[in-house]
Amino acid sequence: LSSADMAINALLQLLTARLADAYTVQVVCDALAEILESCPEALPVRAMVFNSLLGQPETHAEPLLSRISAAHVSNGTLQFVVMWLSALVGGVRPVVERMSQHPGSHAVQLPAVRTLGAIYGDRIELEPRDAECLPEAVQG
């Protein structure tokens, strides 16, 4: 395993073990986001993080980021960090899907809108997967 793989594995284990602790979850999500922002798209580590955070787990009904979001629904700052990490891993589609699953929840909608604003507002050229979701994001 590379050092990035070992660091990500350790962070994912910590995230799972300390799921109820908002501070730890936020720090770990921030660390994962920093690692992902520094890694090129083609690296296999991104696929590993995608599967760990957004993929269907073997032991739980919901992906890890969905469980984190549900556990800390009233924490707007953490919701934004979770949405941002979702977008880094899977593009804007997970954010838009989360918005459509919870249309009446301000605790989900506001961080999602902030995340979409950061994604669409800061980039001159969008990745194809993000450009494809633009109409859905605007409807959200």
Image (cartoon, rainbow, N blue to C red):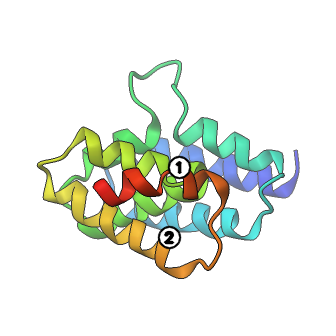
Label number found at residue 14: 1
Residue 44 percent across, percent down from the top left:
81, 45
Q: Is residue 122 left or right of residue 49?
A: left
* Looking at the image, residue 67 lies above or below residue 91: above
Q: Residue at x 31, y 66 (%)?
A: 113
List the single residue furthest toward the top.
Answer: 58
Label number found at residue 74: none
Residue 137: which quarter of the image? bottom left
Q: Is residue 55 left or right of residue 26?
A: right
Q: Amino acid at mark 2?
A: Ile
Q: Quadrant of the C terminus?
A: bottom left
Q: Could you say whether the residue bearing mark 2 is in a helix, strand or loop? A: helix
Q: Amino acid at mark 1?
A: Leu
Q: Residue at x 43, y 44 (%)?
A: 65
Q: Could you say whether the residue bearing mark 1 is in a helix, strand or loop? A: helix
Residue 70 percent across, percent down from the top left:
26, 43
State if disc 2 and disc 1 touch (CB < 8 Å). Answer: no
Label number found at residue 119: 2
* Looking at the image, residue 39 lies above or below residue 13: below
Q: Nearer the viewer, residue 101 or 70?
A: 101
Q: Is residue 40 left or right of residue 13?
A: right
Q: Is residue 96 left or right of residue 16?
A: left
List the single residue furthest toward the right.
Answer: 2
Residue 55 percent across, percent down from the top left:
55, 32
Mark 1 surroundings: few (<14), some (14-19) or many (≥20) residues within 10 A: some
Specify which label sits upstream in the sequence, 1 or 2: 1
